[in-house]
Image (cartoon, rainbow, N blue to C red):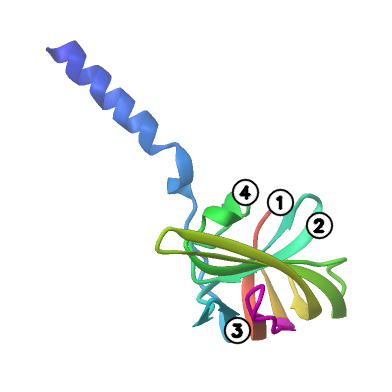
Amino acid sequence: MRSTLFRCLVLSLGLSACGDASIRPEPLLDGATLLLFGDMVEAVNGIATVVDGAPTIILGTGEVGCGSEEDLPSLSGVNVAISLPSLTPGSHDITATFYRNVDGERTSRTVTGRFSLYDASEDSMTVAPQIIDMNPDEGNALAIGRSTVVRCAN
């Protein structure tokens, strides 16, 4: 009996250390960004990270946090991943992929747009997407605003 209890305790402790339990959402540090992809929402979380070697900003209503870039389509809510050519302050042409995972329905759409990068420090970045792609057949996609996000260490 005691050995069975011990094995169950060890197994439960091991399982609790696995998976997404270590990823915590990173709230926006400042500002506001509106997103439209099926629903009009205001981003509440955001990060600056690297995805496939490219600097990437992720904003949304889902569990956006350092490490969440590994499985963007699974994040709940409405989120956008914006791939940047560099972390040089200024305005850039970008590619953005919008993700919507609401009520078990998952959709995504990739669009192009403009993006401004302002202040960049080791801990945070101030970003301003200007993405407007109104196409009712494929789903309207919009990200507009100015927000300060946490910069992940990677």
From this viewpoint, which residue is outermost toward the front?
Answer: 137
Who comes first in sequence, dot 3 or dot 1?
3
Magenta extent:
128-142
Q: What's the mark number on residue 33?
A: 3
Q: Earlier in the sequence, mark 4 or mark 1?
A: 4
Seen at 78% across and 61% down, the residue is 55
* Residue 74 coordinates in the image, percent (x, y): 52, 53
The Cα atoms of the two marked residues, 2 and 4, are separated by 13 Å
Disc 1 target residue: 154
User: Upstream in the sequence, badge 2 or badge 4?
Assistant: 2
Q: Is residue 100 above or below residue 74?
A: below
Residue bearing mark 2: 54
Residue 67 visible (yes or no): no
Q: Name the residue type under label 1.
A: Asn
Where does label 4 land, which residue?
70
Inspect the magenta stretch and tell me whether residue 129 lies in it: yes
